[in-house]
Image: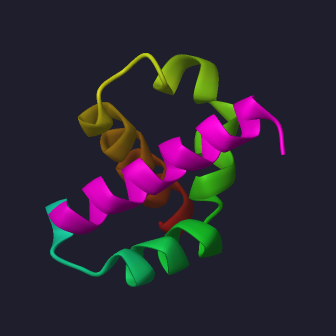
Amino acid sequence: MSETQREKNLLVVAAVEEYARRHGISAHETLGLFLKFGVTEAIRQCYETLHTQSMDESASFAEDVLKSRSA
C-alpha cells in the first residue's frame, strides 16, 4: 500500500470517528453508513482538499455527502 493510500485511509478513519462523536453513535455504525452511501470513497476522491482542512471539515463533508445520497 502506498503512503498516499495510507494517508487517505487515516483521513477516512478520522472522519468516521468525528462523525460518530458528533452524532453519538459508534464508529462501527458510522463506518456502515459511510460504506453504504459511498462516503469513504468520496473522502478518498477529495483527499487533496480535505487533508488540508480540519477534522471538523471532513466530518461536515461526510454529513453533506450522506444527506445528498440518502435523501
Above or below, 7 against 17 in this view is: above
Above or below, 29 against 66 in this view is: below
Rendered residue at 62%/70% (across/down): 35
Residue 22: x, y in percent?
16, 60
Instruction: Specify whether 45 is left or right of 62.
Output: right
Rendered residue at 73%/32% (across/down): 3
Q: Main secondary structure of the magenta part?
A: helix
Q: Is residue 63 magenta?
A: no
Above or below, 65 against 53 in this view is: below
Residue 46: x, y in percent?
62, 29
Q: Is residue 12 magenta?
A: yes
Colour scheme used in the picture?
rainbow
Above or below, 70 against 55 in this view is: below
| Segment tinted magenta in the rendering | 1-21
Q: Quadrant of residue 23?
A: bottom left
Instruction: Specify whether 32 is left or right of 53.
Output: right
Rendered residue at 61%/19% (across/down): 48
In the depicted view, which residue is nearer to us: 45 or 4?
4
In the depicted view, which residue is nearer to us: 43 or 68?
43
